[in-house]
């Protein structure tokens, strides 16, 4: 995994290497779009028409662009959380459970608090509470990993299933709004949700998310704490040898990662929906994983990939209705992108190796 | 038996073998010496059928042979044993030996057992054919490797650094085995970095340098030379600067030769036992860990400027000793004092702050982060501390600047300070570790197998650094399984046996014998 080769350890990018990096990303993107186009052709659809429609619908039209940008907020916060975990060598795949439980807690808390506290305080308290809920949901995998070395891929996935189920149980049995027929939490009024930016429909969670991603990136690349996490991720034995407090670092990395994913849940609920319905699960947690890999755990790159992916998602959703291409086609594109990125990476490395000897 | 005639092998950018002509005779142990990159491994891979020469030819029994696959190589009666064990641990001995057979034939166990008995008699080994391989010692696993190499036929046996992971007992067993094979008329090729082994086992020594045969010492000449003469001749062949050329070597080169020949290592004793000891270990006990020998009431004193060697067969508690002293492993019982102060409860950061340094033998496993740049690895144990970090913020320009300086001062051969340390050669990785640990603030340094896996040149350089550190007043502990190197640089040598410090002897004329006795568990004389 060259993604951890410490490219963030040395934040000195010259112009030439930046261009090379861009090229390494743009070539796979182009190849993925071409290969995806061939698949569309095989399905009897017009690829150019589809791409044009997606572009038009998600970026060129103002309404679509606002939707795309709004969609980015939770994805970016999840990406920030995953960057921390993945760089620390912790494969937190329990994002969906952490996200949903935190979303439910904030959705239940907000309507209850809004009568007592002012709007700003309510929103802040809900976001903090969601962060804690996410972090707490990672505690069992964290302790198992730190103390006994239990594989966190399995434990976080299992906790994720439990978290999703527990969220549904909470909505259906405890937090249910008695006034609705469909089981859901009490709604937060539109005026009480996260403030919108300058008369658009984009809520300020996007600003929070972008700032968080940048802060996480700077933390990982320019602070002692970030470097400690990277050492832990790249070579656990070396972390022990260098005297790092491995158990504590593991638990902190888990908590930060899951906490940010929990915050993403709160931002999505407080900014967009105002309520959580039973059986609602956008599964953002797992969707973001490939984006974080594509960006090689780089915070700036992940902003670009998230924009790309949000546009595909938003455009793809309406394309599913209008053009008749299934929405899952978006995932096919992401998969193709990962594939071509790996191939370009491989070819690039063998070429460089041949050049070296 | 086997002859190389003007063999050349090129790889992109380098000539690995340049018109090499060598002859390997039956009933002779032919030692190949040379630095890493001298072409030894290429030569082995040509004979083992993994690569073909670009020019020249290989003759087997006087007939030109095209060795185009490992199978062909085995059919010709050539067997190779490599540094690492290449057997399946979960299978039994006899199953491992039957693996090479044809795909379609049923496994002929009876025939295999007959061949196994034959080879056991030939080698003089006693191994249970039905024992699982993972239950055997490394030495026994290597004996199985040798059997596998000889399985088809026993004409030519290649041994590539076979002693690097053996105990002294294992080395002696291997020596006996080689003598038996030699007596049966097998041609043996032994590749090693250890000169003393070359003299002990070899009938003929060839030295490779930069892909060429730099010199040969035939059996007659080898017998008449003293050890010092042999070393002088071999070192000069390996590194150039032959006295015969008449040209005066440049002064820098002479200094390097002095290091290589170990002249600088014989040193005056600089420590003062009248002063209080720097480090005092009182009855140290460590907790047992999976498959590792814990410490059992280990006590010793160590003075500034002294080099204390720790000898012993691998796995007798040396690792725990190093880790306990470095703070990487907690002290369960006992007391550790540095300059009179109790430092027993401290962990790595506190110990390091007090000047205790630890050079691990697992350089890429735990000593460094292979994917991180050299610069980051040079400050790996100082993350978060001044001057490289202020309020937790990294000062990368300073880290890189100081790395460039350390790279230059310690002669670390790396393209730049940003190169991942895992891409460097073993010798240069060790230089990175030595630069990190033997810094100006070091007061006690523990070095675990500091020359392990290095070629001769880098072995000598590492020992030179250690001796220089002691001369600066650092109290040094060197753990090694190579007794010769301990005898060369240490003031006193302790022996670990089953987690205890069986005894400490002064390094004088009778030291080697006393140490040998202590290593087998006999009480201190």
Image: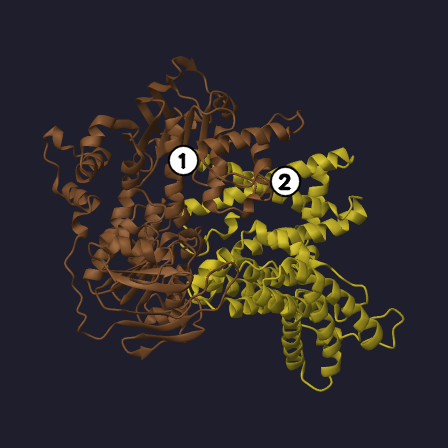
Chain colours: A yellow, B brown
Residue nearest the viewer, comparing A17 with B197: B197
Give how far apart the Cα atoms at labels 2 and 1 are: 61 Å
Q: Chain of mark 1?
A: B
Examine the rendered structure and indicate whether residue B14 appears above or below residue A20: above
What's the chain of the residue with tag 2?
A: A
Kindly identify the residue that appears in the image at 51 percent across and 63 percent down: B289
Q: Nearer the viewer, residue A227 or B488?
A: B488
Left or right: B133 with respect to B495?
right
Is A297 left or right of B361, judged from the image as shown? right
Please give the name of the residue rendered at 20% of the width and 47% of the height, measured from the top-left corner: B262
Q: Tell me whether circle 2 and circle 1 mark residues in contact (CB < 8 Å).
A: no
Task: Find residue A32 and name its label.
Answer: 2
Instruction: Return the residue at label 1.
Output: B177
Answer with left or right where residue B255 lies relative to residue B218. left
Residue B160 position within the rendered picture, expressed as x and y whole percent measured from the top left: 39, 35
The answer to whether residue B237 shows anywhere in this view is yes
- Crowding near pointer 1: few (<14 within 10 Å), some, many (20+)? some
- Residue occupying the point 9% across, 30% down: B246
User: Residue A271: where, in percent of width, then height?
Assistant: 69, 69
Residues at marks 2 and 1, common chain? no
Give the number of the disc on residue B386.
none
Image quarter in which the C terminus of chain A is found: top left
């Amino acid at each position: 995994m060259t993604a951890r080769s410490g490219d963030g350890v040395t934040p000195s990018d010259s112009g030439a290497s930046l261009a090379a990096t861009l090229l390494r990303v743009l070539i796979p993107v182009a190849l993925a779009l071409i290969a995806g186009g061939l698949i569309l052709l095989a399905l009897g659809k017009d690829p150019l028409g589809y791409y044009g429609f997606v572009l038009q619908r998600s970026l060129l039209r103002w309404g679509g662009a606002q939707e795309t940008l709004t969609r980015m907020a939770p994805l970016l916060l999840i990406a920030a959380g995953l960057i921390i975990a993945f760089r620390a060598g912790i494969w937190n795949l329990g994002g969906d459970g952490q996200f949903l439980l935190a979303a439910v807690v904030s959705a239940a808390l907000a309507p209850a608090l809004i009568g007592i506290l002012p709007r700003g305080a309510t929103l802040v308290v809900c976001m903090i509470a969601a962060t804690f809920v996410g972090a707490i949901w990672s505690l069992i995998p964290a302790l198992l990993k730190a103390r006994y070395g239990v594989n966190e891929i399995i434990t976080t996935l299992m906790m994720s299933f439990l978290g999703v189920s527990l969220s549904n149980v909470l909505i259906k049995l405890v937090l249910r709004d008695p006034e609705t027929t469909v089981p859901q939490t009490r709604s937060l009024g539109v005026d009480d949700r996260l403030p919108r930016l300058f008369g658009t429909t984009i809520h300020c969670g996007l600003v929070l998310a972008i700032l968080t991603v940048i802060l996480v990136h700077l933390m990982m690349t320019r602070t002692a704490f970030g470097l400690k996490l990277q050492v832990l991720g790249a070579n656990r034995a070396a972390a022990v040898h260098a005297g790092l407090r491995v158990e504590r670092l593991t638990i902190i990395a888990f908590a930060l990662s899951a906490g940010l994913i929990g915050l993403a849940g709160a931002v999505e609920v407080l900014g967009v929906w105002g309520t959580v319905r039973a059986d609602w699960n956008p599964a953002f947690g797992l969707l973001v994983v490939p984006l974080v890999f594509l960006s090689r755990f780089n915070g700036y790159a992940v902003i670009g990939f998230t924009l790309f992916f949000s546009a595909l998602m938003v455009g793809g959703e309406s394309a599913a209705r209008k053009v008749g291409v299934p929405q899952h086609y978006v995932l096919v594109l992401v998969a193709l992108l990962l594939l071509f990125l790996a191939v370009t990476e491989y070819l690039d490395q063998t070429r460089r190796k041949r050049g070296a000897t | 038996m086997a002859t190389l005639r003007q063999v050349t092998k090129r790889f992109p950018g380098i000539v690995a073998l340049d018109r090499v002509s060598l002859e390997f005779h039956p009933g002779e142990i032919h030692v190949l010496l040379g630095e890493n990159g001298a072409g030894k491994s290429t030569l082995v891979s040509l004979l083992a059928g993994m690569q073909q020469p670009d020019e020249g030819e290989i003759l087997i029994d006087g007939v030109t042979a095209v060795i185009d696959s490992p199978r062909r190589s085995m059919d010709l009666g050539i067997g190779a044993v490599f540094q690492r064990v290449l057997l399946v641990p979960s299978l039994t001995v006899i199953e491992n030996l039957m693996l090479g057979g044809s795909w379609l034939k049923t496994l002929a166990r009876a025939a295999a057992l007959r061949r196994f008995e034959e080879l056991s008699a030939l080698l003089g080994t006693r191994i249970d054919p039905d024992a699982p391989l993972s239950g055997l010692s490394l030495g026994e696993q290597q004996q199985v490797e040798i059997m596998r190499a000889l399985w088809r036929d026993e004409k030519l046996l290649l041994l590539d650094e076979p002693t690097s992971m053996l105990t002294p007992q294992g080395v002696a067993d291997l020596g006996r085995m080689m003598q038996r094979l030699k007596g049966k008329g097998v041609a043996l090729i032994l590749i090693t970095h250890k000169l003393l082994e070359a003299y002990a086992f070899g009938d003929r020594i060839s030295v490779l340098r930069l892909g060429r045969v730099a010199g040969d010492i035939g059996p007659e000449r080898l017998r008449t030379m003293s050890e010092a003469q042999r070393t002088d001749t071999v070192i000069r062949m390996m590194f150039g600067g032959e006295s015969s050329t008449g040209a005066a070597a440049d002064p820098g080169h002479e200094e390097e030769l002095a290091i290589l020949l170990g002249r600088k290592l014989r040193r005056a004793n600089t420590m003062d036992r009248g002063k209080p000891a720097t480090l005092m270990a009182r009855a140290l006990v460590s907790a047992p860990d999976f498959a590792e020998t814990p410490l059992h009431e280990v006590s010793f004193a160590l003075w500034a400027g002294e080099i204390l060697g720790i000898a012993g067969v691998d796995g007798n508690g040396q690792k725990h000793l190093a880790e306990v002293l470095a703070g990487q492993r907690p002290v369960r019982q006992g007391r550790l004092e540095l300059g009179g102060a109790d430092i027993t409860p401290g962990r790595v950061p506190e110990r390091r702050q007090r000047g205790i340094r630890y050079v691990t033998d697992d350089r890429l496993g735990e000593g460094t982060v292979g994917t991180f740049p050299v610069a980051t690895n040079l400050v790996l144990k100082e993350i978060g501390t001044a001057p490289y970090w202020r309020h937790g913020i990294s000062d990368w320009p300073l880290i890189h600047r100081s790395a460039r300086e350390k790279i230059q001062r310690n002669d670390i051969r790396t393209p730049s300070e940003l190169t991942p340390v895992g891409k460097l050669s073993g010798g240069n990785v060790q230089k990175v570790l030595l630069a990190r640990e033997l810094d100006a603030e070091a007061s006690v340094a523990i070095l675990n197998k500091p020359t392990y896996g290095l070629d001769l040149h880098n072995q000598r350089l590492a020992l030179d650094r250690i001796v220089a550190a002691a001369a600066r007043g650092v109290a040094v502990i060197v753990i090694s399984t190579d007794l010769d190197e301990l005898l060369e640089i240490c003031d006193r040598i302790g022996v670990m046996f089953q987690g205890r410090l069986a005894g400490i002897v002064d390094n004088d004329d009778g030291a080697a014998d006393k140490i040998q006795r202590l290593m087998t568990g006999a009480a201190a004389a």
